[in-house]
């Protein structure tokens, strides 16, 4: 699985959040993917050019569907400036996308040169293809 290291600038996003259930290996990604799919569909009714952010917010694993800026919903999240592993797929089905995210984390964790540097990731839904950014740090 190929990825590149890119620099992202600090950016604030705001939007609507939903709690993501803990991953259950017996159920696979289906439950989590369904929650994300519903959140995206609800937000897409009123917004374009948005992102999805998987993050621990206030002690709760959360999926935030958001736009750039601070006035697009009830929750804001700041993406820190830094290095990110960028993964791209043409996959469009949500469960397959979540599997891709899991595989992407596996690539970063198995890398000899970088490691995961944060407790969030950015799903850039503004791109033509699904683009995932995982914050990383040099080992």
Image: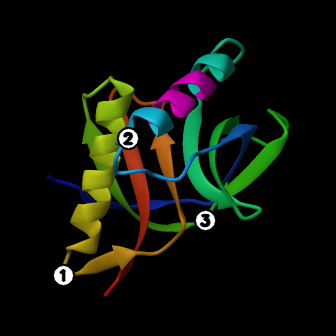
* Residue 43 x %, y %: 67, 22
Mark 1, other Cα within 10 Å: few <14 / some 14–19 / many ≥20: few
Task: Give the side of residue 99 with respect to residue 84, left or right.
Answer: left
Q: Mark 3 points at which residue?
A: 80
Q: Nearer the viewer, residue 24 or 107?
A: 24
Q: Mark 1 points at which residue?
A: 112
Q: Which mark is residue 27?
A: 2
Mark positioned earlier in the residue sequence (3 or 2): 2
Q: Tell me which residue sits at (63%, 60%) in the image.
A: 10
Mark 2–mark 1 Cα distance, whole angstroms, equals 31 Å
Q: At numbered mark 1, what does the secondary structure look like: helix, strand or loop?
A: loop
Quarter of the figure with the C terminus: bottom left
Task: Give the side of residue 122 with respect to residue 75, left or right.
Answer: left
Considering only vertical position in the picture, is 119 above or below 137?
Answer: above
Q: Tell me which residue sits at (77%, 62%) in the image.
A: 58
Q: At numbered mark 2, what does the secondary structure look like: helix, strand or loop?
A: loop
Mark positioned earlier in the residue sequence (3 or 1): 3
- Would you say the residues marked 3 and 2 are in contact, meaning their CB atoms lie under 8 Å apart? no
Q: Tell me which residue sits at (28%, 44%) in the image.
A: 100
Considering only vertical position in the picture, is 11 above or below 68?
Answer: below
User: Which range is magenta?
Assistant: 33-39
């Amino acid at each position: 699985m190929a990825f590149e290291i890119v620099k992202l600038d600090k950016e604030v996003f705001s939007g609507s959040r939903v709690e993501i259930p803990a991953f259950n290996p017996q159920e696979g990604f289906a439950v989590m993917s369904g929650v994300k799919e519903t959140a995206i569909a609800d937000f897409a009714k009123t917004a374009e050019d948005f992102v999805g952010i998987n993050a621990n917010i206030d002690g709760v694993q959360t999926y935030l569907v958001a736009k750039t800026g601070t006035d697009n919903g009830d929750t804001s999240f700041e993406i820190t400036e830094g290095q990110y592993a960028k993964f791209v797929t043409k996959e469009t089905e949500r469960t397959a996308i979540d599997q891709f995210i899991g595989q992407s984390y596996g690539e970063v964790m198995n890398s000899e040169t970088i490691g995961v540097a944060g407790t969030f990731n950015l799903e850039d839904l503004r791109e033509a293809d699904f683009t995932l950014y995982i914050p990383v740090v040099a080992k």
